[in-house]
Image (cartoon, helix red, strand yellow):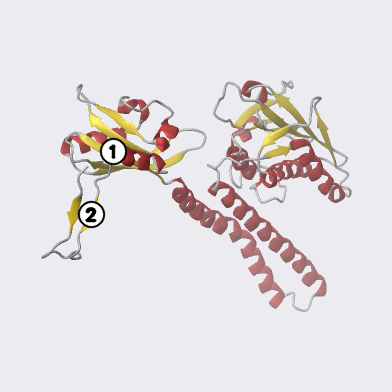
Amino acid sequence: MSAVPIGGKGSDMPDDPVIVDPLEPLAAQRILQLLPDPVLLVRADRSGGAEIAYGNAAAQALFRVSLAGAPLGAALRQPQVLEAIEAAIASHTPGEAPFESIGVQPRYWRAFIRPTPQAGEVVVVLRDETDARRTERMRADFLANASHELRTPLASLAGFVETLRTHAKDDPAARDKFLAIMAEQAGRMTRLIGDLLSLSRIELNEHIAPEGAVDLTRTAQDVADGVRPLLAQRGVTVEVAEAPGGPFEAVGDRDQLVQVVQNLIDNGVKYSPSEGVVRVMIEPAASLESARAPSGREGWVALSLLSPDPSADQRYVVLRVTDEGPGMARQHLPRLSERFYRVEGQRSGGTGLGLAIVKHVVNRHRGGFAVESAEGEGSTFSVYLPVAGA
């Protein structure tokens, strides 16, 4: 290996030469292996296509195929990226192309393509832009949703303030009535902003799977114990039961799973009649098919609102919350997890974000979410999550 002097008389560099050793190929490969971004070395093959000559550890983890010598299309199945790479090889010029990976957890990438000194050869660096895209979408969604949903209570508050300043100024009975309504509207805005912020935080980290183990039965019991004093005046009771063989632990973030259970129980309580019962059941499921299988109640319509990527050996823990409310018609079920969607004729006084929060938390946990209902008979919401330690 020869040394290359840099500097000398007549140069802008220091007079004393600096000796730089050319980087050994193995040393360069070790550096590439440590880079967090996937890196591919792609060259033209004899058939006129392109093949992968090298992929670092991050690329191996991303594509999950043997890269060296593989056709480029076997790993990168994105037409716009393949076209950009082939154009860069043919013209020996740089290029870049954005793309989105398909799946339950979509990710956003940008491919940077740079030619090497060797003709017909390029380096492709893939940069994950998921966080940046999610942050921007979160900001836009938050502004749109907040401005839309806050407009009504703000207009109501402004109207009552004006009334209190004029017509009701000297009317104690009207003044007390309007102040009570204003307090209710202010509380609604507080809950709405809290739910919007919570949903935005969940969406921001939705692509990062949680770790840890959570006992779903204990979590459901804690939530039920917390709401029982508030239900006494309505006469609604919450019953928590566990199938034989427990305790059942799911992979998850306990705080977020408390949110899921809280929202589902609150949803059941809101629509339950006086002296009604909200039943919470936790049970195991040996496969994805058994986890999302409906109860089979006659006349009830079942629909999956979220389903995880299938895995042959994955087991699940299922949480089912059943109420005795008015139920819902078939046409309403697909939209239940949309933000602010409410079934016509059923006004719960909530923010309309509870089931949207449930869906996004379950999606982060790589689980599933389903609903069964029949008009006049009630509803069952089911959440299934991967078993901890499986």
Which circle, 1 or 2, is nearer the viewer? 2
Single out the residue that lies furthest toward the left: 10
Residue at image x 59%, y 60%?
151
Q: Position of residue 257 (x, y in %)?
A: 69, 42
Foreground: 188 or 347?
188
Residue at image x 35%, y 25%?
74
* Residue 218 can be seen in this image: yes
Quarter-of-image position of residue 88: top left
Number of residues whose C-alpha sits closer than 10 Å to that of mark 2, classed few (under 14), some (14–19) or many (20 or more):
few
Number of dots carrying numbers: 2
Point out the image quarter for the C terminus: top right
Kind of residue sitting beneath label 2 = Ile
Vertical position of residue 187 compared to residue 106: above or below: below
- Residue hosting label 2: 19
Kind of residue sitting beneath label 1 = Pro
Residue at image x 65%, y 25%?
315
Vertical position of residue 196 compared to residue 299: above or below: below
Foreground: 162 or 255?
255
Secondary element under disc 1, as helix, strand or loop, is helix
Quarter-of-image position of residue 241: top right
Label 1 with label 2: CB-CB less than 8 Å: no
Vertical position of residue 222 compared to residue 369: above or below: below
Foreground: 338 or 165?
338
Mark 1 → mark 2, Cα distance in angstroms? 19 Å
- Residue hosting label 1: 25
Secondary element under disc 2, as helix, strand or loop, is strand
Q: Position of residue 26 (x, y in %)?
A: 32, 37
Viewed as shown, does residue 308 lie left or right of 68?
Answer: right
Number of residues whose C-alpha sits closer than 10 Å to that of mark 1, classed few (under 14), some (14–19) or many (20 or more):
few
Q: Position of residue 54 (x, y in %)?
A: 32, 32
Viewed as shown, does residue 222 lie left or right of 135?
Answer: right
Mark before the other along the chain sequence, 1 or 2: 2
